[in-house]
Amino acid sequence: MNKTSLLALGLMLALASCTALNKSKKTQTTKDTPVHFIALGNEPNWSLKVTIGEKMQLKTLDENELDYEFKWADFVTESNGIMKANLEDENSELYLIVYPESCSDQMSENEYDYTTELKVRTTEGMPLSTYYGCGKYLPPFNSLLQNWELISVDDNALKSGINKPTLNLNLLNQSIYGNGGCNHYSGQITLGPAEIAIATLASTRMACPPSISIEDTYLQILGSSSFSFDVIDEVLVLKNSDHQLVFQLGK
């Protein structure tokens, strides 16, 4: 075999190896990456699939025909409930606004919980393109967006007369907040495919009578912990190897 043939063979083997590696990497990403929230619209058709804390995948069917993966951009929630995310780098920009207003897709007649506005640029020097549409959290994450009230800890129902702790989640903002039965608390969360990791919690420091509060126990279990979650018949269960917290819909 001459030198030219050997070089050609080596190049073919290298290309085959790279192709196999790329296919493996793509399959792994698709399998392990959940979609928590989706924004979408028509005229033109577009969608933005949001994996909270990781990335946002944009696809459009307009003249741009975009299929572009943006890095994650932290959301800020304003006092009126509007959530905004801004992302800028050398080659791209993204501005997403999620309004807490119901939205109807006129083509499919589907109803959504949010109205969305998206402005993007994926190439340096390209003007911003604007898209309007609707948005929603996808199952099972949409079932978490309630005002929850604690009813039992480790299979022990709360006694009558106890101030029941509450729990609320803002998923796009990656935050948790509520009342421990006496003090208000808040913290950050990380979402997985079927679990919630809760960081260290901060709380106000009002003195509370132990006879009407289980706040210390509740916050010690909840903070700096990871839980699987399940929502069945308006009951939320947070569970790990050490503890189980059961909530019902609050008033």
Image (spheres, rainbow, N blue to C red):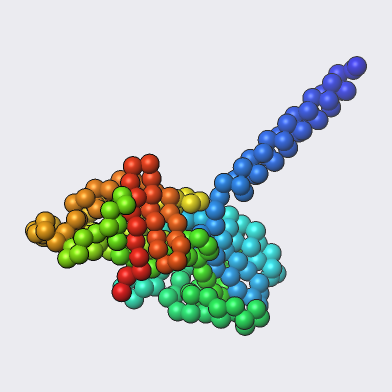
Residue furthest to the top: 1
> Residue 33 at x, y = what percent?
56, 50
Q: Is residue 179 above or below residue 105?
A: above
Seen at 51% across and 55% down, the residue is: 51
In depth, the one of 144 and 16 nearer the eye is 144
Seen at 63% across and 69% down, the residue is: 46
Name which quarter of the figure residue 10 lies in. top right
The quadrant of the picture occupied by the C terminus is: bottom left
**Residue 95 appears anywhere in the view:** no
Seen at 63% across and 40% down, the residue is: 25
> Residue 137 at x, y = what percent?
50, 65
> Residue 67 at x, y = what percent?
65, 58
**Apparent side of residue 84 relative to residue 65 in the rendered image (left or right):** left
In depth, the one of 5 and 164 nearer the eye is 164
In depth, the one of 73 and 106 nearer the eye is 106
**Apparent side of residue 208 relative to residue 190 in the rendered image (left or right):** left
The quadrant of the picture occupied by the N terminus is: top right
**Apparent side of residue 200 relative to residue 70 in the rendered image (left or right):** left
Residue furthest to the right: 1
